[in-house]
Image: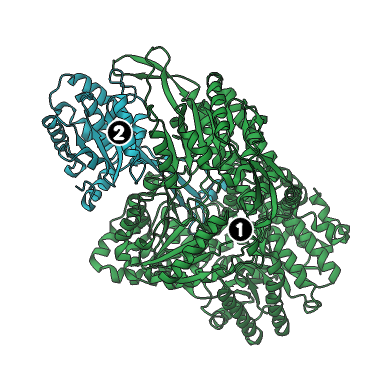
Chain colours: A cyan, B green
């Protein structure tokens, strides 16, 4: 099983480059086409909130610093994410977590054992909204252990009981690979994580870009400042 | 501080030389307004002088403008492509890079990259100049140098694009290169001295003379220095023997650049400079004197000034120079030290009786001087921040040089293209014992008038050499002289009223309030008023270095004592470790008591019990203590620097930077906490209700820090956790426990409660494991190896409690990608710094440089030469570039790897170790060439660099290989092609990318630092999201108590 081959990486890079606002726009257009479920209104409200929060994450922060250099901080997706439902999950939580993970620029393997039809319909709605197929695949067949052991895996997003969270965390910690981020909602009533402003930050990685703008030997901006007449 | 006006008193230069020398250094970064008031007193013109200068300047400008032929090649270029247009900048960027690109594909890519950026079409119609129109063809490129208003700077032109499509890239490339050659031809008098003398003949017939300069980048290697020496020597011979019967003016001279004659012409290498460079220049002096060719030493960066003067004095006073009067130098008027330098030189001449020719220029490194001071956190700038201030300083210096008591001591050579400056000097001068100088290709019309009317000699400073080598250098000159405020293009720009050009700069400056430029903040203020930049001394400047060095030296024999600090009390555990200096194990730095499991339990209990109180402490009080800590660290800089030498083996600049980074962390997180945690947030939860939420600390945070940044990372982790309201149990690296202990002592002094910070020095197994397995631990911040991070993660996960945040910053297998548009000299400086500074013991250090094969041989040659010049040794010495690695274990591992690679790869270069290296844990800086990045195994945390060649067509495959390493910390990119840089940056899965600079030394709040993949979890240290991970949001009004995980 290989969910992050060369082709998938290329598609992911392209998805990542589209930016948060563009991705959110596409994902928002899918909200009214999500497969039916009991709390559809709640899903739409929470999902809208998540996407509203995600859009501004595309802002490139210009950091202060010495003259002659530009320093920028921006956010991108972490890479391959497993968005996984458990018997404690709800359609609302899973859909919102999936949308958030995609909005943040990650490639998603979606899995919810026992809910194959619903997950397939959910993925289909998002594909129709413009999410590339390689960015979102449903995989309910591959054993969880095998998915968790995937070398490219960077992120696991789930909703589960506290005990399941501890167990899942231990399994991830056993891997001899990167430290995979576990983002688990365990308070299914209030969803404090999903509604937290920090939630989306768990799904992204930060990049800093520093450019020596005086590489050709001069700094016209500074020269301009130097010649101001006040 | 001496009074500038005293310069006019003849008695001043009678004072002892040493006393006058002492006046120079203290002005290095003196308060600008205060010093300008002094200079204004000296430079103040009389009403008559103002009127005369204005009248002369007006007349000169009118004559120049009335002359149809006045707008010569370069003037025309500057007029059309002034540097306040994007096209002007792009022209310079292209000129800087295109000619040196050896391969057609990369040259074409650069041309393509630039085509659509600027509005060349608008320039095609404006100029009659052949050069301008030829250049307009190629004028391309980037947009990052200056931010301009898109509405004013035009939309992309389709003209060139259509031409490209029609004509094809090879032809366009040829045309572009031809345009660059035309530019080179205009800027450079001759490709060699013979051609230069021949081309200069016409001007010499008019009465001009020349100062020839074999220009180029500074020498990085002995081989390059030898080549420049040969060039200078040949030039002196040729100039000395050349007979031009029609020439009217004085004999030409030769200018030399000291940085071209020695690869380590820098204050830290004073011993080498005063012996080797002295010998080299003395040979040139003997040769020049024998041929009666005057020599002028060019000015360079401000940090080299004092060294230059010392060398000048030694040469000037040598018997072979005595009695000559042909050995001179350049003084830059934008330097605050210029006047006392001139006074000292006059006194020197007075003692010896030999004339010193002095070229007074305004200065050519202004932008880099400003940048460097900001980066180093210095107290001020060595240069003025307003153009009119430099102009006034220039006239003040001129008044001194033209005063009667200086006549016969100094031969002033006034270099300026400013008609008013020229007029003011002509007004000031009461004798004719001076000359003017101008640059080749610039100011022709102005100086033709001066030559005709003033009867004063005019010398043309003329670059000589290969066009492709010289253009980058000259571009810098043009950026300096062609700025939109510059006189050069306004002189010939009929749209600019003459009255704007003839106001006396003294009057202009007198209207300024304040006298300094408030738009250029002092280095301390670049982050705004709320967060002062950390301070650092400039170790290349005597008045800063001498007292600082004395303070550090006083601590070098100190014996520090450290141990666990629990509830504010240092505990003698009995498990005593002797700390030895890594550079010399004979030297004992002190002793540290290691903690055990029992102390771990005590520390956690105290921290656990103290959490409620600390969390309840208003954030403003918490952060006040951290701000105070930052101040205390600055107050104890000398001790902490000494401790960094003695316990961590850090060099002087590394140690200063270490403390500065710690200070920046204190202030950045304190300020961040005030902003983030002072007021509640409102959030709508899943139940649809809006809740007021507060960010609170999570509980007891464990901070596990590394030995390579024993103060900065230690305090970065701890202060973030504390600012967020957590209590902290800190476990420093066992190798650097004393520094951590001292930091905690200062923390307590700053007002952090004893229950909020606990320190547990000790071994990982005995301290780290018990700490991270305790269920009361609410989070861990860790910096260290990837393997240890995994171990901590497993230990945390093994607990029967909810997962807690683990913020891990781990290693990197960091690459630098270098394409053929880059400047090899700059690449090597940045690569050597990135790979070998701190003995390669930085997470961000360069491990593999990937060089486009077309330039690899040149890059390798430079690398070998530069590595041969590195100095390993005692890190307390200014001359040491590379100190020891941390301990014997690290040393053995690295040496084994070098042995292994000697059999597996091609050894490119290895820096020899110093004589007493066996007393410490040194590893020679080493570079290997390998055939693929995939040969790299795990990170080697030391001074070992690998080099791979790549084909430009395989750039994406190279990026894929780098990504496949799994690490993702730093990446360096060297290219002049912005599109290439952007492409690589966007594809590379790394945390920090550095373009056209070194890739180490991330600054807090400027370059948030941290990686991805095997390099860490994020969020980035020193970034806006870091503090958040130390907190949890808790509702103020609701009873539910489960927050996010």
Kindly identify which residue carries mark 1: B883
Q: Where residue B1024 sits: x, y (%)?
A: 46, 35
Classify 10 Å Cα crowding around label 1: few (below 14), some (14-19), many (20 and above).
many
Kindly identify which residue carries mark 2: A168
Determine which quarter of the picture holds residue B136. Answer: bottom left
User: In terms of secondary structure, where does tag 1 sit?
Assistant: loop
Chain to which mark 2 belongs: A
Above/below status of B472 relative to B369:
below
Chain to which mark 1 belongs: B
Identified at 29% across, 71% down, the residue is B170
Residue B528 visible to an observer of this rendering: no
Q: Nearer the viewer, residue A222 or A145?
A: A145
Tag count: 2
Q: Nearer the viewer, residue B244 or B657?
A: B657
Q: Nearer the viewer, residue A11 or B731?
A: B731
Determine which quarter of the picture holds residue B213. Answer: bottom right
Q: Nearer the viewer, residue B704 or B64?
A: B704
Identified at 63% across, 64% down, the residue is B918
Instruction: Mark 1 and mark 2 in contact? Answer it, CB < 8 Å.
Output: no
Residue B1036 visible to an observer of this rendering: yes
Q: Which quarter shows the C terminus of chain A?
A: top right
Q: Where residue B943 sits: x, y (%)?
A: 52, 60
Q: Where residue B634 sits: x, y (%)?
A: 66, 40
Horizontal side of B811 relative to B462 (left or right) equals left
């Amino acid at each position: 099983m290989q969910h992050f081959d060369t082709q998938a990486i290329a598609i992911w890079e392209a998805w990542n480059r589209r930016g948060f606002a563009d991705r959110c726009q596409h994902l928002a257009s899918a909200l009214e086409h999500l497969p039916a479920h009991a709390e559809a209104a709640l899903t739409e409200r929470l999902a809208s909130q998540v996407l509203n929060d995600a859009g501004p994450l595309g802002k490139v922060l210009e950091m202060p610093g010495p003259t002659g250099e530009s320093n920028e901080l921006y956010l991108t997706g972490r890479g391959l994410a497993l968005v996984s439902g458990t018997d404690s999950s709800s359609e609302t939580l899973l859909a919102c977590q999936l949308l958030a993970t995609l909005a943040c620029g990650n490639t998603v393997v979606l899995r919810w054992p026992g809910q194959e039809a619903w997950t397939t319909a959910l993925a289909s709605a998002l594909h129709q909204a413009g999410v590339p197929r390689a960015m979102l695949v449903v995989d309910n067949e591959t054993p969880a252990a095998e998915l968790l052991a995937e070398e490219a895996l960077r992120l696991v997003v789930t909703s589960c009981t506290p005990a399941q969270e501890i167990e899942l965390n231990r399994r991830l910690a056993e891997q001899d690979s990167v430290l995979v981020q576990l983002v688990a909602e365990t308070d299914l009533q209030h969803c404090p994580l999903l509604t937290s402003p920090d939630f989306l930050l768990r799904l992204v990685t930060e990049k800093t870009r520093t450019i020596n703008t005086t590489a050709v030997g001069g700094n016209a901006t500074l020269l301009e400042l130097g010649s101001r007449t006040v | 501080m001496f009074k500038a006006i005293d310069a006019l008193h003849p008695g001043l230069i009678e004072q002892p030389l040493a006393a006058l020398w002492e006046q120079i250094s203290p002005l290095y970064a003196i308060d600008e307004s205060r010093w300008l008031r002094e200079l204004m007193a000296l430079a103040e013109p009389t009403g008559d002088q103002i009127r005369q200068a204005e009248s002369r300047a007006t007349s000169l400008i009118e004559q120049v403008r009335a002359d149809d032929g006045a707008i010569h090649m370069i003037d025309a270029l500057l007029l059309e492509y002034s540097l306040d247009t994007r096209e002007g900048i792009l022209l310079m960027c292209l000129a800087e890079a295109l000619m040196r690109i050896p391969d057609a594909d990369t040259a074409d890519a650069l041309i393509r990259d630039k085509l659509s950026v600027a509005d060349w079409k608008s320039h095609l119609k404006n100029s009659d100049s052949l050069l301008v129109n030829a250049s307009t063809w190629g004028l391309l490129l980037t947009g990052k140098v200056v931010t301009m208003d898109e509405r004013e700077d035009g939309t992309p032109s389709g003209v060139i694009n259509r031409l490209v499509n029609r004509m094809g890239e090879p032809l366009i490339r040829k045309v572009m290169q031809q345009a660059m050659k035309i530019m080179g031809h205009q800027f450079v008098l001759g490709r060699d001295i013979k051609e230069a003398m021949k081309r200069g003949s016409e001007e010499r017939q008019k009465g001009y003379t020349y100062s020839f300069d074999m220009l180029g980048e500074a020498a990085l290697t002995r081989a390059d220095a030898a080549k420049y020496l040969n060039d200078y020597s040949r030039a002196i011979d040729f100039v000395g023997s050349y007979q031009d019967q029609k020439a009217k003016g004085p004999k030409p001279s030769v200018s030399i650049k000291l940085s071209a004659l020695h690869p380590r012409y820098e204050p830290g290498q004073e011993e080498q400079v005063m012996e080797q460079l002295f010998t080299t220049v003395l040979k040139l002096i003997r040769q020049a004197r024998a041929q009666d060719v005057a020599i002028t030493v060019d000015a360079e960066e401000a940090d080299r000034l004092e060294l230059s003067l010392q060398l000048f004095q030694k040469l000037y006073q040598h018997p072979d120079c005595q009695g000559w009067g042909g050995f001179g130098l350049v003084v830059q008027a934008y330097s605050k030290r210029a006047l006392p330098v001139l006074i000292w030189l006059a006194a020197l001449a007075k003692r010896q009786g030999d004339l010193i020719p002095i070229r007074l220029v305004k200065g050519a490194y202004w932008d880099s001087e400003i940048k460097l001071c900001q980066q180093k956190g210095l107290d001020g700038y060595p240069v003025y921040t307003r153009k009119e201030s430099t102009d006034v300083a220039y006239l003040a210096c001129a008044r001194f040089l033209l005063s009667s008591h200086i006549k016969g001591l100094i031969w002033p050579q006034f270099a300026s293209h400013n008609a008013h400056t020229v007029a003011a000097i002509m007004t000031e001068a009461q004798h004719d014992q001076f000359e003017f100088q101008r640059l080749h290709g610039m100011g022709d019309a102005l100086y033709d008038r001066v030559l005709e009317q003033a009867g004063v000699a005019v010398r043309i400073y003329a670059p000589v050499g290969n066009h492709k080598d010289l253009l980058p250098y000259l571009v810098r000159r043009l950026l300096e002289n062609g700025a939109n405020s510059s006189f050069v293009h306004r002189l010939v720009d009929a749209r600019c009223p003459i009255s704007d050009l003839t106001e006396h700069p003294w009057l202009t400056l007198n209207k300024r309030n304040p006298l300094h430029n408030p738009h250029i903040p002092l280095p301390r203020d670049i982050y705004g008023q709320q967060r002062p930049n950390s301070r650092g001394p400039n170790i290349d400047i005597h008045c800063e270095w001498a007292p600082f060095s004395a303070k550090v030296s006083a601590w070098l024999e100190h014996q520090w004592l450290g141990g666990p600090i629990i509830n504010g009390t240092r505990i003698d555990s009995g498990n005593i470790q002797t700390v030895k200096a890594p550079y010399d194990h004979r030297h004992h730095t002190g002793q540290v008591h290691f903690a055990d499991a029992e102390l771990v339990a005590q520390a956690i209990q105290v921290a656990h019990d103290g959490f409620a109180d600390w969390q309840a402490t208003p954030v403003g009080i918490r952060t006040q203590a951290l701000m105070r800590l930052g101040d205390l660290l600055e107050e104890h800089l000398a001790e902490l620097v000494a401790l960094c030498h003695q316990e961590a083996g850090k060099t002087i600049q590394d140690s200063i930077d270490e403390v500065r980074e710690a200070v920046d962390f204190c202030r950045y997180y304190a300020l961040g906490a005030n902003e983030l945690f002072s007021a509640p947030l409102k959030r709508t939860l899943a139940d649809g209700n809006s809740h007021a939420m507060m960010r609170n600390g999570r509980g007891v945070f464990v901070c596990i820090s590394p030995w390579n940044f024993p103060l900065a990372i230690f305090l970065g982790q701890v202060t973030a956790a504390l600012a967020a309201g957590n209590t902290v149990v800190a476990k420093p690296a066992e190798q650097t426990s004393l520094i951590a202990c001292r930091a905690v002592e200062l923390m307590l002094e700053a007002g952090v409660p004893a229950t909020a910070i606990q320190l547990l020095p000790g071994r990982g197994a005995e301290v780290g494991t018990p700490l991270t397995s305790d269920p009361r631990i609410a989070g861990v911040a860790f910096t260290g190896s990837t393997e240890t991070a995994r171990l901590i993660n497993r230990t945390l996960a093994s607990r029967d409690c909810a997962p807690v945040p683990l913020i891990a910053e781990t290693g990197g297998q960091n690459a630098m990608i270098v394409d053929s548009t880059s400047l090899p000299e700059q690449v090597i400086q940045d690569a050597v710094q990135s790979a070998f500074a701190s003995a390669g013991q930085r997470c961000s250090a360069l491990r593999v440089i990937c060089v486009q094969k077309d330039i690899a041989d040149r890059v390798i040659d430079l690398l070998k030469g530069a590595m041969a010049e590195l100095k390993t040794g005692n890190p307390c010495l200014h001359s040491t570039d590379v100190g020891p690695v941390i301990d014997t274990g690290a040393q053995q591992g690295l040496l084994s790897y070098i042995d292994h690679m000697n059999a597996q790869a091609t050894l490119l270069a290895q820096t020899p170790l110093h004589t007493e290296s066996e007393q410490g844990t040194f590893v020679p800086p080493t570079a290997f060439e390998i055939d693929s990045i995939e040969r790299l195994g795990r990170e080697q945390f030391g001074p070992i660099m690998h080099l791979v060649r790549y084909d430009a067509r395989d750039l994406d495959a190279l990026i894929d290989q780098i990504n496949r390493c799994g690490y993702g910390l730093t990446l360096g990119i060297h290219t002049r092609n912005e599109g290439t840089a952007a492409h690589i940056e966007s594809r590379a899965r790394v945390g920090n990318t550095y373009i056209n600079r070194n890739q180490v030394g991330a600054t807090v709040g400027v370059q948030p630092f941290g990686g991805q993949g095997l390099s860490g979890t994020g969020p980035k240290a020193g970034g806006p999201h870091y503090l958040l991970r130390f907190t949890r949001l808790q509702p103020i009004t609701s009873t539910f108590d489960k927050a996010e995980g």
